[in-house]
Image (cartoon, rainbow, N blue to C red):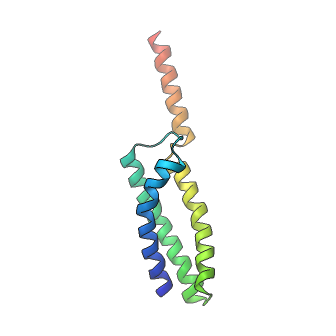
C-alpha cells in the first residue's frame, strides 16, 4: 500500500501546481473556459485520474508485485495522455463545438442586426 499512498500524495501536490502552469503556458493561446470553471473542471478530471492512477499503482505494485519504478512509469504514461486529453478538450480549453456554437450565435446576431 506504500506505493499507492506515495502516489496519492504526489498526485495532490502536482495537481495544485499544474493547473496554473497549464493555464498560463501550455494552453495560453487557446480559447479558454473562465478561470473558476476551469479550476472546478480540472479538480473533477484530476479526481477521476487520481482514482485510476492509484488503482493502477495498487494493482501493478502492491497486488502484482512489480517494482515501483515500473508501476510509476506505466501509470505516468497513462496519466499524461489522459490528463492532456481532458485538459485540451474539457477542463481549460473550450471544445470546438462550444467555439462553433459561439461563432454561429455571433453570425446570427450580426445577421439579425442588419
Determine whether 97 is above or below 59 in the image: above
Find the residue positioned furthest to the bottom. Answer: 65
Q: How many marks can you see?
A: 0
Q: Where does residue 107 sit, x and y in percent of width and height?
A: 52, 21
Residue 21 seen anywhere in this rendered image of the structure: yes
Q: Where does residue 63 sit, x and y in percent of width and height?
A: 56, 88
Determine whether 81 is above or below 55 in the image: above
Q: Residue at the location (42% across, 50% down)?
A: 38
Quadrant of residue 83 in the image?
A: bottom right
Q: Residue at the location (46% across, 63% down)?
A: 46
Residue 1 seen anywhere in this rendered image of the structure: no
- Say left or right for 5 vs 80: left
Q: Where does residue 111 sit, x and y in percent of width and height?
A: 50, 14
Q: Residue at the location (61% across, 88% down)?
A: 64
Find the residue positioned furthest to the left. Answer: 36
Determine whether 9 is above or below 96 in the image: below
- Say left or right for 47 vs 65: left
- Say left or right for 6 vs 61: left
Find the residue positioned furthest to the top. Answer: 114
Q: Where does residue 43 sit, x and y in percent of width and height?
A: 41, 59
Determine whether 61 is above or below 80 in the image: below
Q: Residue at the location (55% across, 39% down)?
A: 97
Amino acid at each position: 500500500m506504500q506505493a499507492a499512498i506515495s502516489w496519492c500524495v504526489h498526485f495532490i501536490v502536482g495537481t495544485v501546481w499544474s493547473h496554473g502552469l497549464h493555464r498560463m503556458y501550455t494552453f495560453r493561446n487557446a480559447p479558454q473556459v473562465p478561470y473558476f470553471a476551469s479550476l472546478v473542471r480540472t479538480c473533477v478530471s484530476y479526481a477521476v485520474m487520481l482514482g485510476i492512477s492509484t488503482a493502477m499503482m495498487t494493482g501493478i505494485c502492491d497486488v502484482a508485485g512489480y517494482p515501483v519504478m515500473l508501476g510509476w512509469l506505466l501509470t505516468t504514461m497513462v496519466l499524461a495522455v489522459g490528463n492532456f486529453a481532458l485538459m485540451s478538450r474539457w477542463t481549460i480549453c473550450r471544445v470546438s463545438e462550444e467555439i462553433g456554437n459561439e461563432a454561429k450565435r455571433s453570425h446570427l446576431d450580426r445577421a439579425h442586426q442588419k
